[in-house]
Image (cartoon, helix red, strand yellow):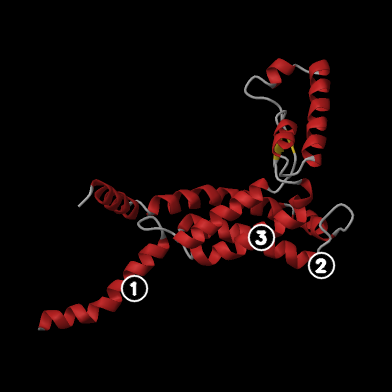
Amino acid sequence: MSLGIRLNQLLNRIAGNTAFIPSLLLRLYLAPVFWVAGTNKLANFDSTVEWFGNPDWGLGLPMPWLMALLATATEVVGAILLLLGLGTRYVSIPLMITMLVAAFTVHWQNGWQAVADSSSAFASDKLGLLQLEDASVAVERLQRARSILQEHGNYDWLTETGSIVISNNGIEWAATYFVMLLALFALGSGRYFSLDDWICRKLRQKHDAPFNSHDDRV
């Protein structure tokens, strides 16, 4: 057997034994993201409903109360289920739909980048692929804010731990969360640290018990 085949078998064995780790980390990463988003909507539910329904400064969606309720419930309940590893594949579907709705109704017109910094205009000029105008406008706002802070604020203290950026509100984060949820849909909850695995083990033991008893008698 060649070294390449042995190495491939070893990597497959390692991947099989550690497959639960990506699922666990994805769940632990996404659970607080959706919990914060959902509980913020819940705490300001009336404002959320207004934002969902208003066509001038909001999303202009039909049945805004129902839409707000569905989005809030999906994120809050989804966060809990992801943390517990319960029904991960099932809950990933409405969460992915929520991310698609957010990407196309809230962020799409702002292009790709979620946050604009001084490199945004440079990157958009060089790539020429993803949103150009929105990034340059965001950078213009950022430069104006920096000039005001440099003139009237303690700019060195404000930027001591990092540079100042401005939200461009693009689809980047919604798309990233969608891809992570899609991975969870494919991987499932993972072994050992999920209720899905515990339930499957119990059901398997219950299913195998009659056969084991029969074997014992034989």
Of residues 98 and 36, the one drawn nearer to the viewer in this rendering: 98
Three-letter code for the amino acid on which mark 1 is drawn: Leu
Of residues 34 and 122, the one drawn nearer to the viewer in this rendering: 122
| Residue at figure coordinates x 66%, y 60% from the top left | 98
For label 2, the residue is 62
Question: In terms of sequence position, does the residue under pointer 1 or pointer 3 come before the other?
Answer: 3
Three-letter code for the amino acid on which mark 2 is drawn: Pro
Percent position (x, y) of residue 30? 55, 50
Percent position (x, y) of residue 169? 74, 44
Q: Check disc 2 and report its element: helix, strand or loop.
A: loop
Q: Is residue 113 left or right of residue 176?
A: right
Q: Check disc 3 and report its element: helix, strand or loop.
A: helix
Report how far apart the C-alphas of labels 1 and 3 lie in the structure. 32 Å
For label 1, the residue is 203
Q: Check disc 1 and report its element: helix, strand or loop.
A: helix
Percent position (x, y) of residue 132? 78, 40
For label 3, the residue is 98
- Do residues under tags 1 and 3 come within 8 Å of each other at their CB atoms? no
